[in-house]
Image (tube, rainbow, N blue to C red):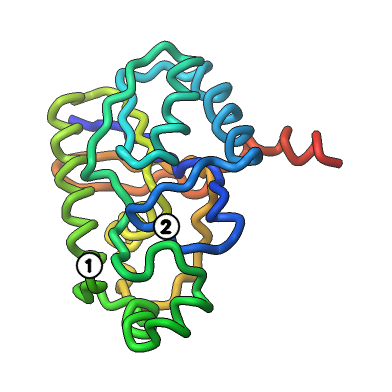
């Protein structure tokens, strides 16, 4: 039994453009992010799928709502698909975080899976929640294709989990806004199929030339 998951990162937010750490705080999609969400929606309108799920954070929910408006699916929100909570670092740029909370930011930047940011959570805690969510959805939608709108940190953790990349290893891959990533859940394990596909965004860059 295999469930095909199309895991999407939300469109660009105002804070993405400013380089701010978002965590559980909300930042609206930027104008570019809205265009990216609509490009995802146009691509998904040509691909049959059974269900549409989203993180309950605004940036993911906004992206999912624009997809749903095009495809006719109901959006089902699940807090287990949220970005990692970054506690006292949320809302700060990396430079500001390094200045205001140097020890915390240094420990966060080292990437250890079990480091809990004060008032936040660890990467391993967030990964466990995401994996449990996907396992539940796989049981609910066996032999189906499911679209999930989530976040860069979640996607990065899932990729590392699938490929056996240590959490503290420097990130040698991109996690793009509105990126299209396919993971298949088969025999209780996740298998990476497609990573970082942004072919649906090409028309946007052509419009800007």
In this rendering, position of residue 178 left or right of residue 106: right
Label 1 environment density (alpha carbons within 10 Å; few <14, some 14–19, many ≥20): few
Helix, strand or loop for disc 1: loop
Percent position of residue 106, x then y = 38, 85
Q: In the rendered view, would you say 10 is above or below 122? A: above
Percent position of residue 102, x then y = 39, 87
In this rendering, position of residue 197 left or right of residue 167: right
Helix, strand or loop for disc 2: loop
In-front residue for pair 9/1? 9
Upstream in sequence: badge 1 or badge 2: 2
In-front residue for pair 91/33? 91
Quadrant housing the C terminus? top right
Q: CA distance from mark 1 to mark 2?
A: 14 Å
Percent position of residue 87, x then y = 29, 66
Residue, disc 2:
22
Query: Which numbered tag is attached to residue 60?
Result: none
In this rendering, position of residue 124 left or right of residue 61: left
Residue sitting at 20 percent across and 65 percent down? 124
Residue sitting at 34 percent across and 88 percent down? 103
In-front residue for pair 33/18? 18
Q: Are marks 1 and 2 in contact (CB under 8 Å)?
A: no
Quadrant housing the N terminus? top left
Which of the 4 quarters of the picture holds residue 53?
Answer: top left
**Which residue is the extreme one toward the bottom?**
103
In-front residue for pair 193/80? 80
Residue sitting at 60 percent across and 42 percent down? 30
Q: In the rendered view, would you say 71 is above or below 146? A: above
**Which residue is the extreme one toward the right?**
209
Residue, disc 1:
119
Residue sitting at 42 percent across and 29 percent down? 64
């Amino acid at each position: 039994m295999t469930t095909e998951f199309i895991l999407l990162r939300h469109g660009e937010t105002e804070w993405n453009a400013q380089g701010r750490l978002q965590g559980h705080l909300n930042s609206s999609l930027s104008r570019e992010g809205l265009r990216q969400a609509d490009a995802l929606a146009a691509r998904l309108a040509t691909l049959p799928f059974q269900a549409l799920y989203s993180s309950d954070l605004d940036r993911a929910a906004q992206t999912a709502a624009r997809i749903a408006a095009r495809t006719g699916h109901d959006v089902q929100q699940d807090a287990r698909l949220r970005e990692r909570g970054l506690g006292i670092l949320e809302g700060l740029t990396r430079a500001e975080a390094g200045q205001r909370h140097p020890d915390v930011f240094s420990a966060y930047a080292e990437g250890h899976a079990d480091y809990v940011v004060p008032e936040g959570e660890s990467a391993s805690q967030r990964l466990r929640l995401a994996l449990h969510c996907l396992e539940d959805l796989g049981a609910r939608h066996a032999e189906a294709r499911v679209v999930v709108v989530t976040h860069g940190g979640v996607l990065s953790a899932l990729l590392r989990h699938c490929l056996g990349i240590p959490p503290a290893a420097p990130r040698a891959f991109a996690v793009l806004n509105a990126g299209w990533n396919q993971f298949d859940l088969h025999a209780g394990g996740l298998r990476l199929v497609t990573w970082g596909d942004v072919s649906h965004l090409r028309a946007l860059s052509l419009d800007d030339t």
